[in-house]
Amino acid sequence: MRALLYTTGSPFARAVRIVLSELELEYERREEITTPSAEQRAVSTPTLQVPTFWDGGLTLWESGTIAEYLLTQYADRPDAAPPLAAYAWRPESQWQDKLVFSTIQTFGNAATTISQMKWSGVGIDQNTHLQRSAEKLFHMLGWLEDQLNDSSDGFFPDCVSMQDIFLASHIRFVQARPLGIDLNLPTYVKINSLLDRLDQRTNFLSEPIWWWEPGVVGYQTDGTPVFQTRI
């Protein structure tokens, strides 16, 4: 039995769900709209974070580890154009591929930290660490832009890589939160082109990132947020 525990808005979990969809793997969705207590979350993972993935008797956490496991464990690639990458790291450039992925995950961590602090009442303009985190986003985007060969491909040639999927999930997360950050994506021509292509891919459309702000407790079928009713 396969199962995935995740919160609705997590970009890390969205990336894992896209990989699962790309592989056409069935699994139980254990979705949480709100974050449970530390004690409840610790039952599933010592990191108190999502996603957590179960595959038979194996339990995995940390989204990159889960995605690497899925790409390694499940070798069949459904027909798609371009196809899902056959591996997490190319044998001839594994350290560069790992460096790209680590940078993308650092981008995601910085973005989600800003988001979490925003909802706790601390904005970018109130905290020097958050200001630094926001600055990091742009430096990382510039570096990642330079790692792409051209505007017609992703980080791996002629396929959709784990790196592509996670970068798209993290950037769209920033754009779907009122964080006061404009990434100015058109200036990153190759990244912007990559994301536009991925947005049209079936498994990205079926696993959307939706707008969220405090008070959102669910979504209509078209993604319209449902706000908590105040009495």
Image (cartoon, grey):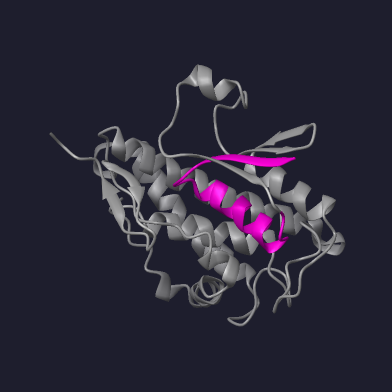
Q: Is residue 141 rendered to the left or right of residue 5?
A: left
Residue 102 showing in the rendered view? yes
Q: What is the number of callouts on the image?
A: 0
For the point 77% across and 47% down, which residue is it? Answer: 69
Query: Is 221 part of what is drawn in magenta?
Result: no
> Residue 162's image quarter?
bottom right
Residue 118 x/y as whole percent: 30, 40
Residue 190 x/y as whole percent: 54, 76
Above or below, 34 against 89 in this view is above
51, 220: nearer the viewer: 220
For the point 73% across and 58% down, which residue is it? Answer: 97
Above or below, 72 against 157 in this view is above
**Quadrant including the C terminus:** top left
Query: Is 17 part of what is drawn in magenta?
Result: yes
Residue 138 showing in the rendered view? no
Q: Is residue 21 rendered to the left or right of residue 199?
A: right
Residue 15 x/y as whole percent: 59, 54
Look at the image and give the residue range highlighted in magenta: 1-25
> Residue 167's image quarter?
bottom right
For the point 24% across and 43% down, which residue is it? Answer: 125
Q: Is residue 151 rendered to the left or right of residue 75?
A: left
For the point 60% across and 21% down, which residue is it? Answer: 43
Residue 175 x/y as whole percent: 37, 59
**Quadrant including the N terminus:** top right
